[in-house]
Amino acid sequence: MELHTHTVEGTDPRLFAEVFTPEGGSANLRPVLLLHGFASSSQLNWRDSGWVDALTAAGRTVLTVDLPGHGRSAAPADLDAYRPSWIRADLLQLLMDAAVRPLADADPTAGVDIVGYSLGSRLAWEFGATQPELVHRMVLGGPGSGDPLADFDLPAARASLADGAEIADGTTAELLRMARLAPGNDLAALLSMVEAVKGEPFVPADAVPSMPLLLVAGDQDRLAATAPELAGLSGQAELLLLPGRTHANAVTSRAFKDAAIRFLA
């Protein structure tokens, strides 16, 4: 079911969001919000990889949302729509629309748990730090203390799209390659996302989530090599490394799903 249209300060971000109810229709546990990564979508990150089915089978209501310019959400021309701070405001409104209530002692239905991957983990970290009254626990996949998009070479990426020019920076080349893989990706919108993210640098030490965290990364994921630094900032974080997994395929791991479900329980 798609969530109804919502506005933040009079602006409709036209985000595509869905709610998936647990098997049997019971809703006696708080919902889980899933935040996908850059150049992906809720369909690719969470439905195709089995996360939605695994969580609903565990009795959880699942909320998914496509970030601006991704999946079935709109691709606004306004650069501000892609800024992390604006997206966090949209996420807060989305949770209000879904009737998520502040955490309350002895009420397992209150608040929300969050699972993020890659860019979704960065957004979750900042959202949890700024909305501690709502967020109970978080699972952050493919996380790092920096943001891969911060060093993304925008001029080189745009030149490559225009005339096929080679990109010298390996991370930029890999992220652009991933962006081109997903059918229907709006590359101009994705580059707007990069530009907006670069304008709001990720400084995790400035605002640290106070709730328990599970950080999960493939042991071959160089983009998440600094995950231990995030764990150190938190003081309430567990770190799980997935043998042989990379940034591209850690999200499909059954061990990742199982660990997340146990942690959120």
Image: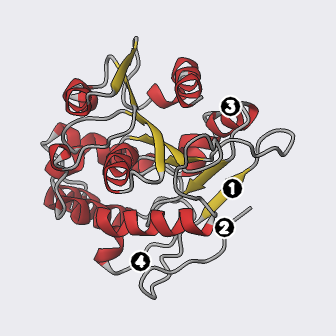
In this view of the protein, which residue sits in the foreground, 184 or 247? 247
Q: Residue at x 53, y 21 (%)?
A: 259
Earlier-in-chain disc, 1 versus 2: 2
**Residue linked to disc 1:** 19
Determine the secondary structure under disc 4.
loop
In this view of the protein, which residue sits in the foreground, 255 or 39? 255
Mark 1 or 4: in front is: 1
Asked if the residue at tag 2 contacts the one at tag 1, i.e. Cβ–Cβ closer than 8 Å, the answer is: yes
Where residue 250 appears, x then y in whole percent?
Answer: 45, 26
Quadrant where the image shows the N terminus: bottom right
**Residue 244 badge:** none
| C-alpha separation, residue under disc 1 versus residue under disc 2 | 7 Å
| C-alpha separation, residue under disc 3 versus residue under disc 1 | 14 Å
Determine the secondary structure under disc 2.
loop
Q: Residue at x 65, y 33 (%)?
A: 50
Q: Residues within 10 Å of mark 3 (few under 14, many from 20)?
A: some
**Residue linked to disc 4:** 76
